[in-house]
């Protein structure tokens, strides 16, 4: 008993060996990198590392080398919370960046609040992160559910849809996006009526029961935030029913990104309007060409994924804020991030000093077949800015 | 009828139930959805039940077998040959090979151990296989196309219904009857049933019991592989799909009665009906229903609807 | 309590009390979590090691204790003592009800029914969003000010867990514990000598559930949050593995198992992302070669040394 405890102490001492060094900047990175969700976390890491390498090549932050400590969030809030805490207490990171899934973002933000470390949320979109759960040390460079819902409502209005069915995942993102859509519909399409509200579990696989409910409800439009494999399964099950011939499918969750379109190829359904932060084939900002080429070289595929740019921007914001603040002190960094504005491969981004939210808009459009390609592309591409007009 | 619908819609405030009552074709589609979901689950659950019936091992790794089936179909059908049916055949074959390795290499040593040991051993196999799948296929999510000629829907008169799902509704009972004929009519099947009853006696009669065990384990695992393969077009192969399916299978097998093929069949149909109609009548609680059925059955009839009471009841 | 055991316990307690002197927030959190999981595993062992039933849903009571604590402290702003008492009472009540049904069964059906009940608890945590936060978890627990800092909380946790383990030890080594062992070894004979076997198994279940609830309530405070995963079945499997790894036929075995598994996971995650592969292989090795767990191994080695003398 005693012996095993001594052994445990020794092992723990080994674990705690990484003593902080004064001549480097430590960034704690939190993405799902091993199991479920790694399909997004891995590309995000590419973007993160690309930004860090660029900065280090130019002399680092405040003349110090940047070192990243990456931990797997497993796409679960409990694991993310433990990982975030360990990054701070064990690896002594100066700042946290990342997060994928709204639930994970909220969990990391809570650790950042307790431990007094700045957290830059690059992907989570739940509105709560920058409203009721906002604190002095959390900032978001991603879009959020109110922007996304508002943009979706604009599309509903453009298409003249009248009866809307809503299907969402049963966690923070789904609930908040549904609320964002509802608010947006009041603004842009007041005569559109929501007739059905469906909630499915994160990781759900069988959608037939919901598809027939949607088809039976007689709606002409579906709003949704089913992302990733949820959308793949939903589309594969809905297509044979003729669902996508009967309704227009307006979706958040970036299912217009090339990682989905390139995977589904000919199986990608008709009548989908969706969003993405970045498209490798669309050069919105002149600097995007160079960014995309560098990313292609790094990831080894010409057609690059959308997630890297989000992680990339997060790091660039931290670097700019640190240079402005002149230190990595959490309060100084937080002060510098308020109102911080930088140019990114997808345009200028500014963080609102009050809400801690960046004005991150997204590209929206219908997914259409393209001559000579076996996957669908967004055409026309419309940038909907992060502005909500009351 | 109209007054009932009105009562449900307005007084009970349940638009889902009202829609089911007022729209027969909607009610019919939910019935078909129940069956098609049930039949896919049945194929997998039947394998789990079969293995338990003979080997007395609850195989947690069954979900991982299902996941391997789906991944193999992706590799063979989507990447190499483009032929879905070749993919399903490869999934069956691949699982047969895996089953031999796992049964001979591990499971044969635990048949006379406690249930806890067995349960944990199969859990160890789950952990290992999930990472092996990750090493082979990475963490990508894949999309598998429907087989040629089954992309669309068939006109059933009242409504259109997806061809592939109809195919599942047909293939499920066919497998059930096949398994039943196999256990009732073939020598191997009769020995299998005998092995369920009394292993020592069979061994004393000169029957090679280990071979029966291996055979049953292969058969059960192949069912999981084929079930996973058949699910791949509507259930994109992705890490974690093993953990989701195994819980569903447990519910079905326990509700139907461990070891009973027809029990799994009925258990799967109950599962499908409760999930599909439940999600309409009590919206958004569908994820909790399976456990309510399981609880109800365990409280009233722990050995399941078609099982036989045994030592389990103290 | 025998002298060497008492001395060893005092030594461990003292060593644990010295941990904050290392001045590492990481180590304080690490040992705090290890202690919590040790208590969790010890509590499970009352069902497995002492009454001989395998619970596959023990995480449910851990989660009930944790959620009760989190919600009462934060949403209802209760003070620590009433909230803690309520957490204990809730896990007691829940396990009392579940035990009533589960003890009618044994073996695989017992395991399945415990699993079914735990999934129901998971379902409630998952769907009751307004109260529990649903799939996002209950994030941000208001820990009372006097233990809000790391070191005071660590000592609070140490005292609570130390007391809980002591009470468990007394229970398991009382006449009740011996009667339980008799039930495990031979239920029929135990029945003949006048032991109400079902009542004994009911008590074992309730004791286990209540102490799991205590562990859960501390978990909610150390993590400042509670998540649905804590009620999901893999969590029950994890604590079962801890118990088995340590050895279910010794009182302290599960605590050693919990500590080993926890440290092993942290260490493995440093070097490889394939933790499940490592855990699976370890589990396989224990089952094949060490069915009595680490405690069994230690005893075997001791016997070997004694014989060699």
Image (spheres, coloured by chain):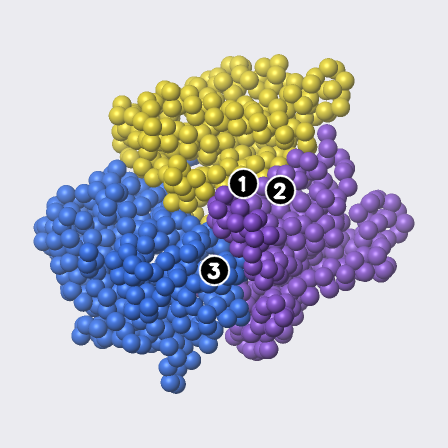
Chain colours: A blue, B purple, C yellow
Q: Nearer the viewer, residue A219 or A328?
A: A219
Residue A356 pos. (x, y %) = 18, 50
| Above or below A37: residue C236 | above
Q: Nearer the viewer, residue C106 or A148?
A: A148
In the image, are marks 2 and 1 on the same chain? no
Q: Is residue C250 left or right of residue A176?
A: right
- What residue lies at 48% left-to-right and 46% top-to-bottom? B10
- Spatial separation of the CA atoms under disc 2 and disc 1: 10 Å
- Taking the image as drawn, is residue B191 in sight? yes
**SS for callout 2:** helix
**SS for callout 3:** loop
| Residue that carries the numbered disc 3 in the rendered image | A217
Q: Is residue A147 left or right of residue A255?
A: left
Most extreme residue toward the bottom, as rendered?
A: A372
- What residue lies at 66% left-to-right and 38% top-to-bottom? B298
Q: Is residue A121 left or right of residue B29?
A: left
- Taking the image as drawn, is residue A20 in sight? no
| Residue that carries the numbered disc 1 in the rendered image | C119
Which class describes the residues within 10 Å of circle 3: few (<14), some (14-19), or many (20+)? Answer: some
Most extreme residue toward the right, as rendered?
A: B205
Most extreme residue toward the front, as rendered?
A: B3
- What residue lies at 32% left-to-right and 56% top-to-bottom? A181
The numbered mark 2 sits on a residue in which chain?
A: B
Residue C191 pos. (x, y %) = 74, 20
| Above or below A337: residue B173 | below
| Residue that carries the numbered disc 2 in the rendered image | B294
Q: Do tag 2 and tag 1 residues touch (Cβ < 8 Å)?
A: yes
| Above or below B295: residue A182 | below
Q: Nearer the viewer, residue A306 or C36?
A: A306
Quadrant for residue A132, please give it. top left
């Amino acid at each position: 008993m005693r012996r095993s405890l001594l052994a445990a102490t020794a092992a723990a001492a080994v674990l705690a060996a990484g003593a902080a060094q004064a001549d480097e900047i430590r960034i704690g990175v939190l993405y799902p990198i091993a199991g479920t969700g790694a399909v997004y976390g891995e590309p995000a890491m590419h973007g993160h590392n690309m930004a860090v390498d660029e900065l280090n090549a130019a002399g680092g932050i405040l003349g110090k080398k940047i070192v990243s400590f990456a931990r797997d969030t497993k796409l679960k809030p409990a694991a993310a919370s433990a990982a975030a805490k360990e990054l701070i207490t064990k690896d002594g990171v100066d700042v946290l960046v990342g997060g994928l899934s709204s639930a994970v973002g909220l969990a990391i933000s809570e650790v950042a609040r307790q431990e007094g470390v700045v957290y830059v949320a690059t992907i989570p979109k739940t509105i709560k992160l920058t409203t009721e759960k906002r604190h002095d040390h959390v900032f978001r460079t991603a879009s959020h559910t109110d922007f996304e819902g508002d943009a979706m409502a604009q599309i509903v209005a453009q298409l003249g849809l009248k009866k809307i069915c809503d299907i969402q995942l049963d966690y923070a993102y789904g609930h908040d996006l549904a609320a964002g859509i509802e608010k947006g519909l009041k603004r842009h399409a007041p005569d559109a009526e929501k007739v059905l509200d469906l909630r499915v579990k994160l990781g759900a696989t069988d959608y037939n029961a919901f598809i027939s409910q949607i088809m039976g409800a007689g709606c002409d439009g579906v709003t949704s935030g089913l992302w990733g494999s949820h959308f793949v399964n939903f589309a594969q099950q809905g297509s044979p029913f003729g669902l996508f011939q009967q309704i227009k499918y307006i979706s958040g969750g970036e299912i217009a990104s090339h990682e989905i379109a390139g995977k589904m190829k000919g199986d990608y359904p008709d009548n989908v309007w969706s969003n993405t932060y970045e498209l490798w084939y669309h050069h919105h900002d002149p600097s995007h060409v160079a960014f995309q080429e560098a990313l292609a070289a790094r990831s080894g595929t010409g057609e690059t994924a959308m997630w890297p740019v989000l992680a990339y921007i997060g790091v660039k914001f931290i670097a700019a804020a640190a240079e402005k603040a002149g230190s990595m002190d959490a309060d100084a960094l937080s002060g510098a991030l308020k109102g911080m504005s930088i140019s990114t491969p997808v345009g200028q981004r500014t963080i609102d000093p009050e809400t801690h939210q960046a004005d991150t808009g997204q590209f929206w459009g219908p997914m259409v077949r393209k001559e000579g390609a076996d996957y669908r592309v967004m055409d026309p591409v419309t940038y909907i800015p992060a502005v909500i007009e009351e | 009828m109209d007054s009932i619908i009105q009562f449900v819609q307005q007084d009970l405030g349940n638009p889902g139930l009202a829609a089911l009552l007022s729209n027969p074709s909607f009610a019919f589609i939910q019935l078909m959805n129940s069956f098609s979901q049930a039949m896919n689950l049945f194929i997998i659950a039947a394998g789990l039940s079969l293995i338990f019936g003979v080997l007395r091992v609850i195989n947690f790794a069954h979900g991982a077998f299902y996941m391997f089936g789906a991944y193999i179909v992706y590799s063979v059908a989507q990447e190499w040959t483009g032929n879905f049916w070749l993919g399903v055949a490869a999934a069956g074959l691949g699982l047969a090979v895996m089953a031999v390795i796992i049964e001979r290499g591990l499971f044969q040593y635990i048949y006379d151990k406690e249930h806890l040991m067995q349960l944990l051993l199969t859990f160890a196999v789950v952990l290992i296989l999930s990472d092996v799948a990750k090493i082979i296929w990475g963490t990508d999510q894949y999309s598998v196309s429907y087989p040629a000629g089954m992309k669309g829907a068939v006109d059933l008169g009242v409504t259109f219904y997806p061809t592939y799902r109809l195919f599942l509704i047909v293939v499920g009972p066919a497998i059930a009857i096949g398994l039943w004929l196999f256990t009732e009519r073939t020598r191997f099947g009769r020995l299998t049933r005998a092995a369920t009853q009394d292993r020592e006696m069979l061994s004393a009669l000169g029957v090679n019991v280990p071979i029966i065990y291996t055979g049953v384990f292969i058969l059960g695992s192949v069912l999981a592989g084929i079930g996973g393969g058949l699910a791949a077009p509507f259930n994109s192969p992705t890490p974690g799909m093993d953990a989701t399916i195994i819980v569903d299978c447990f519910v079905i097998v326990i509700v139907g009665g461990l070891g009973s093929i027809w029990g799994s069949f009925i258990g799967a149909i109950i599962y499908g009906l409760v999930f599909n109609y439940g999600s309409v009548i009590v919206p958004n609680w569908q994820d909790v229903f399976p456990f309510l059925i399981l609880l109800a059955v365990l409280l009233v009839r722990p050995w399941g609807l078609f099982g036989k009471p045994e030592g389990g009841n103290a | 309590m025998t002298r060497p055991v008492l001395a060893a316990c005092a030594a461990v307690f003292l060593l644990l009390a010295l941990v904050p002197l290392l001045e590492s927030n990481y180590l304080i959190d690490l040992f705090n979590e290890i202690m919590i999981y040790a208590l969790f595993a010890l509590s499970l062992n009352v069902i497995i090691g002492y009454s001989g039933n395998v619970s596959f849903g023990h995480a449910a009571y851990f989660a009930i204790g944790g959620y009760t604590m989190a919600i009462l402290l934060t949403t209802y702003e209760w003070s620590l003592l009433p909230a803690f008492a309520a957490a204990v009472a809730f896990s007691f009540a829940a396990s009392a009800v579940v035990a009533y049904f589960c003890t009618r069964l044994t073996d695989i059906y017992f395991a399945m029914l415990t699993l079914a009940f735990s999934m129901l608890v998971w379902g409630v945590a998952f769907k009751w969003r307004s109260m529990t936060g649903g799939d996002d978890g209950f994030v941000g627990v208001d820990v009372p000010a006097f233990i809000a800092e790391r070191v005071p909380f660590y000592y609070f946790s140490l005292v609570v867990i130390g007391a809980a383990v002591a009470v468990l030890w007394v229970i398991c080594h009382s006449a009740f514990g011996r009667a339980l062992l008799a039930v495990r070894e031979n239920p029929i004979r135990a029945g003949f000598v006048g032991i109400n076997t079902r009542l004994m198994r009911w008590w074992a279940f309730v004791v286990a559930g209540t102490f799991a609830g205590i562990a859960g309530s501390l978990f909610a405070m150390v993590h400042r949050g509670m998540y649905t995963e804590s009620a999901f079945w893999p969590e029950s499997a994890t604590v079962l593995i801890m118990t088995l790894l340590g050895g279910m036929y010794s009182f302290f075995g599960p605590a050693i198992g919990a500590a080993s598994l926890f440290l092993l996971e942290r260490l493995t995650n440093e070097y490889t992302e394939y933790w499940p592969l490592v855990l699976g292989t370890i589990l396989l090795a224990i089952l094949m070669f060490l069915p009595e767990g680490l405690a069994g191994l230690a005893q075997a080695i001791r016997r070997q040394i004694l014989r060699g003398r």
